Image (cartoon, helix red, strand yellow):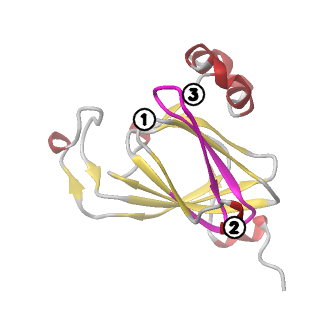
Amino acid sequence: MSGPTAVELITRLKLARHPEGGWYRESYRAAGIVAGNLLPQRFAGDRAFCTATFFLLEQGDISALHRIKSDELWHFYAGAALTVHVITPHGDYCPLKLGSDLAAGESFQAVVPAECWFGAESEGAYSLVGCTVAPGFDFADFEMGSREQLLRQFPTHAGIIRRLTPEWSEHAE
């Protein structure tokens, strides 16, 4: 018995296209709110305590390089392994491999620290993951990476940057 296809999951989970690539749906937003004056200065305004989303990448899709102002905890649910490519503010490259093959170094969970640039790729037909963000996600905290800017800032990671930035981002500054 095989599992569901990507199309079946997109339909059953009611996923929509995400600006960074792939498919997503917010599945939880905490009712509790953290007042903006209690958050670090990088946040402008109040935020939910926490948010959670489903995120699905199909083969050939990318999650384009972007960053957010909160830590993001990724959870592996189904499908093929997924690599989250992380570039820290100091320029270190830290790939995170999500999947169910622990013997091959895959993990069920991985954290992308706040302010890191990151994007992802599925290693098969699709990967279904979840993303938990605290303080909760707000599109005001989301920044899509510009290919030109990232290449200037992190030239040693040119291959990953070119692969995980859409061509339209070349002039997005």
The boundaries of the magenta stretch are 74-101
Mark 3: amino acid: Gly
Q: Which of marks 2 and 1 is in front?
A: 2
The label number, if any, that marks residue 75 in the structure image: none
Mark 1: amino acid: Glu
Residue 166 in percent (x, y) is at 71, 30
Q: Mark 2 points at which residue?
A: 103
Mark 2: amino acid: Ala
Q: Are marks 2 and 1 in contact (CB under 8 Å)?
A: no
The front one of 6 and 85 is: 85
Q: Which of marks 2 and 1 is nearer the N terminus?
A: 2
Element carrying mark 1: loop
Tag 1: Cα neighbours inside 10 Å, few (<14), some, or many (≥20)? some
Specify the quadrant of the image occupied by residue 169.
top right
x 40%, y 38%: residue: 141
Q: Mark 3 points at which residue?
A: 145
Q: Are marks 2 and 3 in contact (CB under 8 Å)?
A: no
x 55%, y 35%: residue: 66
Element carrying mark 3: loop
The front one of 102 and 159 is: 102
How much space separates mark 2 and mark 3, taking CA atoms?
33 Å
The stretch drawn in magenta includes residue 51? no
Looking at the image, residue 163 lies above or below residue 56: above
Tag 3: Cα neighbours inside 10 Å, few (<14), some, or many (≥20)? many
Q: Mark 1 points at which residue?
A: 115
Residue most toward the bottom? 1
Question: What secondary structure predominates along the stretch shown in magenta?
Answer: strand
Looking at the image, residue 22 lies above or below residue 105: above
The stretch drawn in magenta includes residue 91? yes
